[in-house]
Image (tube, helix red, strand yellow):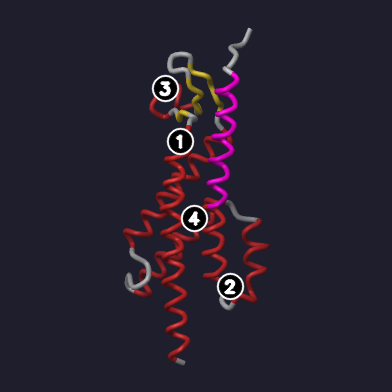
Amino acid sequence: MGLKVPEEMEKEYHLVCGKILSLNLTLEGTLNFFLSNYFAYPQNHKTFVLGDFFSESSFRDRIGLFKKISKREISFYHNEIFDEKETKYIIKLMDEVREIRNRVAHCQSIYDLRTETIILNTGKSIIKEEDNIIVNEKLIKVTEEKVNLAKNGIMELHTRIMQKRIKEKSKK
């Protein structure tokens, strides 16, 4: 006989997981917007970037590309547009959201009788209890905060790049 998870808790678990996956998609969308606008300027080249590249790259790949762009821009513009500390923070946030999303999508969920919670368990979690993630409203709030900070940072960098391009174009 298996242990039955309370119906309300199971319902909350699925709602939390859905919200986490949705938050991840909004962050990916913001990153895709940034990357497509970075490479497809003017806008008539956007179809290739959005269609071919993004359909064949993972979120991790796109975060890596953002990291490379940041390094290039920092060395080229000497922190005029991209600040190294700022971009490292944005990358850290995106990686943390990606990790939470991956845990939600791929880790085993277990009902913990001691705490009466559902946790996401990895192989490491069996040995290190602190590696467990409790699936609840708090997880949504933490993830939402990280997503919003990362999105705002990405959009701020996008705005600075566009302003720089407009300024350079007007000098010609």
The stretch in magenta equals 7-26
Element under disc 1: helix
**How would you rate the neighbour count of disc 2 (Cα within 10 Å): few for under 14, some for 14-19, many for 20 or more?**
some
Where 99 falls versus 121 (above or below)? below
Element under disc 3: helix
Dot in front, 2 or 3: 2
Task: Find the distance from the CA under tag 3 to the CA under tag 1.
Answer: 22 Å
Residue extending furthest bottom?
172
The quarter holding residue 21 reads: top right
Mark before the other along the chain sequence, 4 or 3? 4
**How would you rate the neighbour count of disc 3 (Cα within 10 Å): few for under 14, some for 14-19, many for 20 or more?**
few
Mark before the other along the chain sequence, 2 or 3? 2
Task: Find the distance from the CA under tag 2 to the CA under tag 3.
Answer: 47 Å
Where 63 falls versus 139 (above or below)? below
Q: Which residue is mark 2?
A: 40
Q: Amino acid at mark 3?
A: Ile
**How would you rate the neighbour count of disc 1 (Cα within 10 Å): few for under 14, some for 14-19, many for 20 or more?**
some
Residue extending furthest top?
1
Q: Is residue 12 magenta?
A: yes
